[in-house]
Image: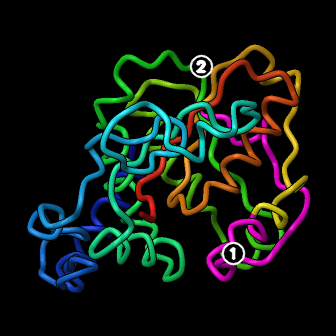
Amino acid sequence: MLVNALRETAKVALDLVFPARCVNCRAEGTLLCANCLDDAVRLDGPACSRCAAPMKSGSLCQKCAASPRQTGVDRLIAAYKYDGAIREAIHALKYEGLRAVAPQLGGLMAQLPALGGMKLDLAIPVPVHPSRLRSRGYNQSDLLAKEVAARLSLPLDARSLRRVRNSPPQARTPDEQQRARQVEGAFEAMPDRVTGRRALLVDDVATTCSTLNACAGALKAAGAGWVAALVLAREV
């Protein structure tokens, strides 16, 4: 208790000297202010249930409907369009070491109505390769998943899925087919931990969904019964 009290005192002192500023507009008070969040584009309209691509009607987009054999994600839920303040917040978390913004972002993900009626057994963060973990010092998806799991009262399992092969960052690869090739066979899951389970993958951004599908494929190959994915943002 004394340690926690000292940490809280130190936090208050730091906030007085370096008050929190919004990562987007730089207003003081919070790392992502209400005004910027109000301006963020929510993906709460009709969307493909498998890849979360916005569409006017139906349950599957043309691309997913043309691929009936689904070895990847069974359902993808995305909170926001990858743009504006949300993009700035993700960039700050992922590349600028601003881990303090993760609880707020994870909270935004966990409150999505689509999660309410979903039966889930565990939350799994999308893993990074050990070499990237060493260089960055943390996995941003793990930080988000911790908040999501806590708010949804789900067990957090950061050990059942691991990245066994490194590849260039997906953001540097615009071609969808090349992205898929880069992550093919890059993940491995532990059968004794996921067999028959309904898993929720957690990541920051979905673009082509190649990484999420590769993770889901590894989980299903290890016996997972159903795999959904939750991301803060989706490129549309």
Where in the figure is residue 101, as x and y percent of width and height? 36, 65
* Total numbered labels: 2
Task: State the residue at coordinates (59%, 36%).
Answer: 65
Q: Residues within 10 Å of mark 2 (few under 14, many from 20)?
A: some
Q: Do the numbered discs 1 and 2 sit on residues whose CB atoms are within 8 Å?
A: no
Q: Residues within 10 Å of mark 1 (few under 14, many from 20)?
A: few
In the image, is residue 210 above or below residue 56?
below
Task: State the residue at coordinates (69%, 75%).
Answer: 175
Task: State the residue at coordinates (90%, 56%).
Answer: 164
Report whether residue 209 is seen: yes
Quadrant of the snapshot with the C terminus: bottom left
Badge 1 marks a residue whose secondary structure is loop
Where in the figure is residue 86, as x and y percent of width and height? 32, 68
Q: Amino acid at mark 2?
A: Asp
In the image, is residue 167 above or below residue 212?
below
In this rendering, which labeled residue sits more in front, label 1 or label 2?
Answer: 1
Inspect the magenta stretch and tell me whether residue 173 lies in it: yes
The Cα–Cα distance between marks 1 and 2, rounded to whole angstroms, is 34 Å
Residue assigned mark 1: 175
Which comes before the other along the chain, label 1 or label 2?
2
Residue assigned mark 2: 121
Where in the figure is residue 114, as x and y percent of width and height? 35, 29
In the image, is residue 162 above or below residue 30?
above
Report whether residue 2 is seen: no
- The answer to which of 191 and 82 lies nearer the viewer is 82
Q: How is the image coloured?
A: rainbow
Q: Amino acid at mark 1?
A: Asp
Q: Which residues are magenta?
A: 156-179
Task: State the residue at coordinates (78%, 71%).
Answer: 178
Extreme residue in the left direction: 35
Marker disc for residue 198: none
